[in-house]
Amino acid sequence: MVLEALDRIREAEDKIEEMRHLVKEEIRSYEQTKSDDFKKKQEESQAKVTALLHEIEGQKKEELQKEKDSLLSEANEQNQNFKEKYEKNKESIIDHVIERVKKIYGSQ
């Protein structure tokens, strides 16, 4: 009877130990699953952030290109205006300079 009780106690202890190992395995498996889920969500989040940054970068590049084109167009327009004014006033300026020289140094 005592031996039988000791055997049952030993069997119970063995079952408890087996259950403890099973629970540890379940916990490890659960932790691994949660860790994998977390990594997957983290990667998805990182991909979304990267995509958003690329989109914003593309928009900024486009805006900068438009601004550059606008500034170049404005500069070209100003250059053209200066050339036109120069051509328009060139003769009168030359005549004016000649007249001043004649006044200062006299007509020879």
Image (cartoon, grey):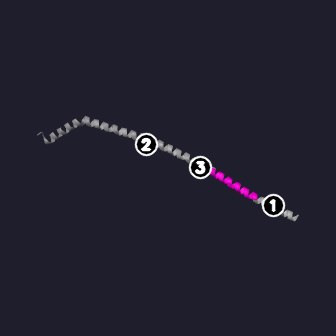
* Quadrant in the picture for the C terminus: top left
Crowdedness near tag 3: few (<14), some (14–19) or many (≥20) residues, C-alpha within 10 Å: few
* Residue at the image point whose x is 40% and y is 41% from the top: 68
Q: What element carries label 2?
A: helix
Q: Do the residues labelled 2 and 3 touch (CB within 8 Å)?
A: no
Disc nearest the viewer among 3 and 1: 1
Q: Where is residue 42 in the image (x, y as percent from the top left)?
A: 59, 49
* Relative to 96, residue 8 above or below: below
Q: In this view, does 1 lie to the left or right of 96?
A: right
Give the residue at mark 2. Answer: 64
In the rendering, which numbered label is found on residue 11? 1
Q: Judge whether residue 90 is colored magenta.
A: no
Gap in Å between the C-alphas at discs 2 and 1? 78 Å
Q: Which amino acid does label 3 sit on?
A: Gln
Q: Is mark 3 on a helix, strand or loop?
A: helix
User: Between residues 21 and 97, which one lies in front from this camera angle?
Assistant: 21
* Residue at the image point whose x is 65% and y is 51% from the top: 34
Q: Earlier in the sequence, mark 2 or mark 1?
A: 1
Give the residue at mark 3. Answer: 42
Q: Judge whether residue 23 is colored magenta.
A: yes
Q: In this view, does 24 lie to the left or right of 69?
A: right
Which portion, as a residue range, is magenta? 18-36
Q: Is mark 1 on a helix, strand or loop?
A: helix
Q: Which of marks 3 and 1 is nearer the N terminus?
A: 1
Q: Which amino acid does label 1 sit on?
A: Glu
Q: Which amino acid does label 2 sit on?
A: Leu
* Relative to 13, residue 60 above or below: above
Q: Earlier in the sequence, mark 2 or mark 3?
A: 3
Q: Are marks 3 and 1 in contact (CB under 8 Å)?
A: no
Disc nearest the viewer among 2 and 1: 1
